[in-house]
Image (tube, rainbow, N blue to C red):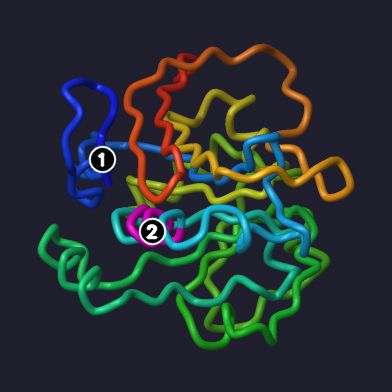
Amino acid sequence: MRRLLPEPAVEIDPFEAYRDVPGARGEPWLRIGMVMSADGSVTDEQAWTDGLGGDADFRVFRILRALADGIMVGATTIRTGRVGPHRLRPELRARRAAIGKPAPAPIVVVSGSLALDWTLPLFTAGESIVVTSAAALRSAKVPDPVQVLSAGEDTVDLAMAVRDLRERFGLCHLLCEGGPALTTSLIAAGLADELCLNLAPTLIGGGHHTRLLGDLPDRADLEPTAVYLDEGVLFLRYALSRRR
């Protein structure tokens, strides 16, 4: 991977580059990681992300996961059945252990209804935490060994959820992988610190186009902090100015 900004342009180790955030030092940090086509779609022709950024995108995807304490995913994405337990390749497992994180990061599922398939491997063969509301917990049961975090009475209070994930579970450095609804809500609540947007060198067209975000209530300004290039994919890093 080659760093284009900040100058000078040099070859870099992406693990070390993306590690250079407060979250790597045990401080609160919420990072959003997403891939997008050059014409703005976050899904490919099969309505998934696999066909957008190729191997370069997957390498960074795995690195962002290896650096995180917890990986946040919205319930709609989980219902596709394509999100499994977090598994680390041997090299990344060793590098993660070297920075004091011996176990893979748990998948944090944000669900307002708890309408989830509890037979998915994510819940039966991996470590997961389900964030929901008190009202949903009164009407649905979460099976063991899935851990549950109740945040909010009638709907999920994301600010409370992020706080409790850090204080109760020790998940200081959080990575949100979407989907668009969860990402939009985190930005709107002023909870996101960084957007890592991977721009794939491909055009999807309107027939398969899926938006990066939903409707934000207010404008959110971004500050570019770094640009990398690998196999045609531009890796853009932005700081969000609406931080809490």
Q: Is residue 160 above or below residue 190?
A: below
Q: Position of residue 54 (x, y in %)?
A: 51, 60
Q: Is residue 209 above or below residue 109?
A: above
Residue reaching furthest to the left: 98
The residue lying at 71 percent from left, 52 percent from top is 43
The residue lying at 66 percent from left, 83 percent from top is 120
Q: Is residue 244 visible?
A: no
The residue pinned by badge 2 equals: 65
**Alpha carbon separation for disc pair 2 and 1:** 21 Å
- Give the secondary structure at mark 1: strand
The residue pinned by badge 1 equals: 2
Q: Position of residue 78 (x, y in %)?
A: 68, 66
Horizontal side of 4 relative to 75 (left or right) equals: left
Disc 1 marks a residue whose amino acid type is Arg
- Give the secondary structure at mark 2: helix
Q: Which residues are magenta?
A: 58-64
Q: Is residue 15 visible?
A: yes
Disc 2 marks a residue whose amino acid type is Arg
Q: Is mark 2 in CB contact (under 8 Å) with mark 1?
A: no
**Tag 2: Cα neighbours inside 10 Å, few (<14), some, or many (≥20)?**
many
> Which disc, if any, is residue 80?
none
